[in-house]
Image (cartoon, rainbow, N blue to C red):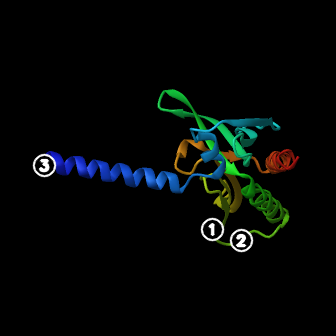
Amino acid sequence: MKKNLLAIFLLFSLTIGMAQQMAYSTKIEEAVNTTGFLFKQEVFSLKNISLFRADALKITNIETFKSTSGLRIIQSIQVGKKQATLHSYIDAQEIDGLITALQYISTILKNPTMPSNYTEIKYNTLSGFQVKLYTMLNDQGKLAWRLTVCSKISEPASLREVPLNEISSLQDVFKQAKQKLQN
């Protein structure tokens, strides 16, 4: 009886875990990982930046001619003593949101007025890619802006601080991806 209850509990836990994982999948991630159909994958290389590698993807189901496009972020992270590769997928529709968020962040940084309390501005994609601008105390005990990019929120090792002068590089990557996927 205990073995049956344990088996049912494990099966239930596995089902819930898989359902949660599937609920957070992006369309491009589902297209890349779907089996049982013939597909063509086009990979468009984008400008390299030091934080991660980004590739624009266009997946076409050859049987139905349905296309899905988006962005794949590839980042090397340290897991214990080993290096691991983390893949994050961003749907084409979310690229506009990232471009807008980075433009807003650039505008905020040009404003000489500093907030008097902790402030954060962030944009999260469905897959957990995050761009975040926040205030933090600097060496003189005053608030200063910090910018971070996280390839996958669920993986803390993917968090990287971005120098404020490299916002334009991030914008260029996302603009280039949008342009390549429109052609």
Determine which residue is flagged by label 3. 2
Residue 78, quarter of the rendered image: top right
Residue positioned most to the left: 1
Circle on res. 115: 2
Neighbourhood count class around disc 3 (C-alpha, 10 Å): few under 14, some 14–19, many 20 upward: few
Amino acid type assigned to the residue bearing label 3 in the image:
Lys
Establish if 150 lies above or below 119: above
Q: Are marks 1 and 2 in contact (CB under 8 Å)?
A: yes
Where disc 2 sits, the SS reads loop
Query: For the point 68% across and 72% down, which residue is it?
Result: 116
* Residue at x 72%, y 57% (from the top left corner): 94
Identify which residue is drawn at 52% across, 57% down: 23
Mark pair 1, 2: CA separation: 7 Å
Choose between 112 and 171: the one closer to the eye. Answer: 171
N-term-proximal mark, 2 vs 3: 3
Query: From where the camera sits, is residue 151 visible?
Result: no
Q: At numbered mark 1, what does the secondary structure look like: helix, strand or loop?
A: loop
Who comes first in sequence, dot 1 or dot 3? 3
What residue did someone put label 1 on?
118
Question: Which callout, 1 or 3, points to the residue nearer the camera?
Answer: 3
Horizontal placement of 146 versus 111: left or right? left
User: Is the residue marked by circle 2 packed among few (<14), some (14-19), or many (20+) residues within 10 Å?
Assistant: few
> Image quadrant of residue 98?
bottom right
Disc 1 marks which amino acid? Tyr
